[in-house]
Amino acid sequence: MIPLSFYLILGAILFSIGVAGFFFKRDIISIFISIELMLNAVNLTFVAFSHFWHQAAGNIFVFFVMVVAAAEAAVGLAIIIAVVRNRQTLNADKMDLMKL
Amino acid sequence: MHPALFFIFGAIAVAGAVNLLVQRTPIFSALSLVAVMGALAVLYLLLGAEFIAFVQVLVYAGAIMVLFVFVIMLLNAQQPESSHRSRVARLVGIPVVVLLFMEVAGVLAATYANTPVGFSGRIITVQAIGDALFHQYLLPFEVTSVLFLVGVIGAVMLAARQEPPQPPEGRLPRAQAAGHGGSGPTPEMAAALRQPARALGGVVAPDAEPHAAGTEVKSR
């Protein structure tokens, strides 16, 4: 038997690495990948609590997180394509205007 | 069995996440994230969330990450050169991240230290999830369809290539732009497209006028 806290700490490790990637990465696609890692860490926490309390609601929330992540990935990658087509760079430091 | 699987796949997940952090090329980061997602799917199975485990593999690792890999290859993404601002971010970011981890992990470990969970046959089945999704959470489920519709329209609007503004004078530049930009059929392509209609139909005489293409299609 594994303590619930192990799962939660694993989720915290993955979330912290995602935050670190969000801080350190310079190209915008890697920043987006780091956000996906953070979403996965939160999903692990949801599933662990869902198992612990034996509630299906946690799994439903994970389902909705995945749905929103799919829509977010589609729109976000389209924004990245539009921005890169106009700026000719992936460097997030150089994207300092909301104008295309 | 359960602790061994937890530690093996937890280690794989952490190793994949660290690899994601240190890799310089985005394609390697994306493939590391696929490894993390696969390991997390095993952990979901250990926690009895079979539906979430399968959806994780199918939707997350299968669909979303393929979208990422497509975009990375489409843009030919490389790591940008290091700048002064990125070094400052590293200097400030590492203590912030370590502090954040200590805070979150400390609170979690203190609160849920002696609460064992295990693969004790408590599986949250697909039936239970479907029951909750289509009774209790029916309205959010329907709202997600609107979200997807907006997402599809937004993705197409954003990623569609804008046509360069047409020069206002005359028809000749327009025809040249269409011929060179590849946005419309060239005269040779249009002639090639008309060719099968003549060969198959045999209704239109070989010396028919080129602008009679519409009637050829109708006569077939």
Image: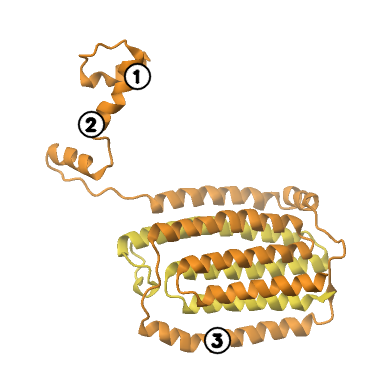
Chain colours: A yellow, B orange
Label 1 element class: helix
Circles 1, 2 touching at the beta carbon (< 8 Å):
no
Looking at numbered disc 1 in the image, what kind of residue is underneath it?
A: Val
Image-based side of A19 in relation to B158, left or right: right
For marks 2 and 3, give the one nearer the viewer: 2
Query: What's the chain of the residue with tag 3?
Result: B
User: What kind of residue is marked 3?
Assistant: Val
Q: Residue at x 76, y 57 (%)?
A: B50
Q: Chain of mark 2?
A: B
Mark 1 chain: B
Q: Position of residue A67 (x, y in %)?
A: 61, 55
Tag 3 secondary structure: helix
* Marks 3 and 1 share the same chain: yes
Give the quadrant of the C terminus of chain B.
top left
- Name which of mark 1 and mark 2 comes first in the sequence: 2
Residue beneath disc 3: B96
Which residue is label 1 attached to? Answer: B217
State if disc 1 and disc 3 touch (CB < 8 Å): no
- Circle 2: is it few (<14), some (14-19), or many (20+) Cα within 10 Å? few
Which of the two discs, 3 and 1, sits closer to the camera? 1
What residue is drawn where x is 56% and y is 68%? B32
Whether residue A79 is visible here, answered yes or no, is no
Q: Kindly report the distance in space between the C-alpha atoms of the residues bearing marks 1 and 2.
A: 18 Å
Residue B159 location in percent, x, y? 39, 53
| Residue under the point 33% across and 59% down | A85
Residue B16 at x, y percent in the picture: 60, 72
Do the residues at discs 1 and 2 belong to one chain? yes
Q: Identify the element where label 2 is drawn.
A: helix
The extreme right residue here reads B120
Kindly report which numbered mark, 1 or 2, lies closer to the viewer in this rendering: 2
Image mark for residue B188:
2
Q: Quadrant of residue A94?
A: bottom left
